[in-house]
Image (cartoon, grey):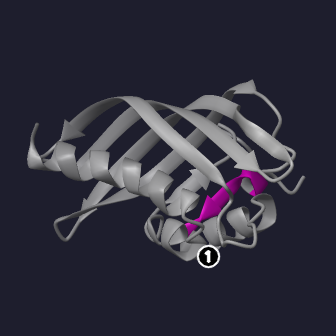
């Protein structure tokens, strides 16, 4: 695997690790030069731009518990990377499976889906350019989402 492939794959996994750890500022920081799109080709209100926009998304949507975490585990798999080294861009697709256990919810899968990501290399560092989140299967997200 190339250095770029390792760096981008680690970026994908870092997102999940920081989110499960409840470090929403760090999650938002991964999108300093990018955005999360809640809907592919969606209207402007479904696009959360830059660190501030992404932080707003997670503040709006994610329940955080007394221990400072959402009590989730985001498992990312089936990562397929397509890198253009000369252009400093890349794209990927991957699957996610989120489990959760809370005092009121026994351990279970709450959602599965897939991501479409694009990346850009700025000053030698890979960053998220865009992340589109697709929900493929939905379970009980009542203990995870605020809405």
- For residue 5, above or below residue 36: above
Relative image position of residue 23 (x, y in whole percent):
55, 71
Badge 1 crowding class, 10 Å Cα cut-off, few under 14, some 14 to 19, many 20 or more, is: some
Relative image position of residue 7 (x, y in whole percent):
22, 53
Q: In this image, 83 relative to 108: left or right? A: left
How many numbered circles does the render carry? 1
Which residue is at 29% across, 42% downward? 90
For the N terminus, which image quadrant?
Answer: top left
Which residue is at 34% across, 54% downward? 11
Pick the front one: 92 or 23: 23
Which residue is at 19% across, 71% downward? 123
Q: In this image, 75 relative to 106: left or right? A: left
Relative image position of residue 107 (x, y in whole percent):
70, 38
Can residue 87 be seen from the camera position used here? Answer: no
- For residue 23, above or below residue 146: below
**Within the image, what quadrant is residue 65 found in?**
bottom right
Q: Name the residue under label 1.
A: 52
Pick the front one: 81 or 71: 71
**Within the image, what quadrant is residue 85 found in?**
top left
Which residue is at 48% across, 64% downward? 31
Can residue 100 be seen from the camera position used here? Answer: yes
- Magenta stretch containing residue 126, yes or no? no
Query: For the magenta stretch, what is the residue range?
Result: 45-50
Relative image position of residue 131 (x, y in whole percent):
52, 47
- For residue 121, above or below residue 28: above
| Element type at mark 1 | helix
- Magenta stretch containing residue 48, yes or no? yes
Q: In this image, 102 relative to 121: left or right? A: right
**Within the image, what quadrant is residue 63 found in?**
bottom right
Pick the front one: 41 or 139: 139
């Amino acid at each position: 695997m190339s250095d770029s492939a390792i760096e981008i794959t680690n970026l994908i996994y870092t997102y999940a690790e920081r989110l499960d750890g409840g470090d929403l500022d760090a999650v938002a920081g991964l999108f300093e030069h990018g955005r999360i799109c809640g809907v592919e080709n969606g209207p402007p209100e479904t696009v959360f731009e830059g660190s501030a926009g992404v932080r707003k998304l997670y503040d709006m949507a994610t329940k955080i518990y007394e221990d400072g975490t959402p009590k989730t585990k985001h498992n990312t798999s089936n990562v397929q990377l397509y890198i253009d080294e000369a252009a400093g861009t890349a794209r990927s697709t991957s699957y996610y499976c989120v489990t959760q256990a809370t005092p009121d919810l026994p351990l279970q899968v709450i959602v599965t889906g897939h991501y479409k990501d694009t990346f850009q290399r700025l000053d030698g560092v890979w960053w998220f350019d865009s992340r589109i989140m697709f929900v493929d299967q939905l379970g009980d997200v009542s203990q995870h989402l605020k809405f």
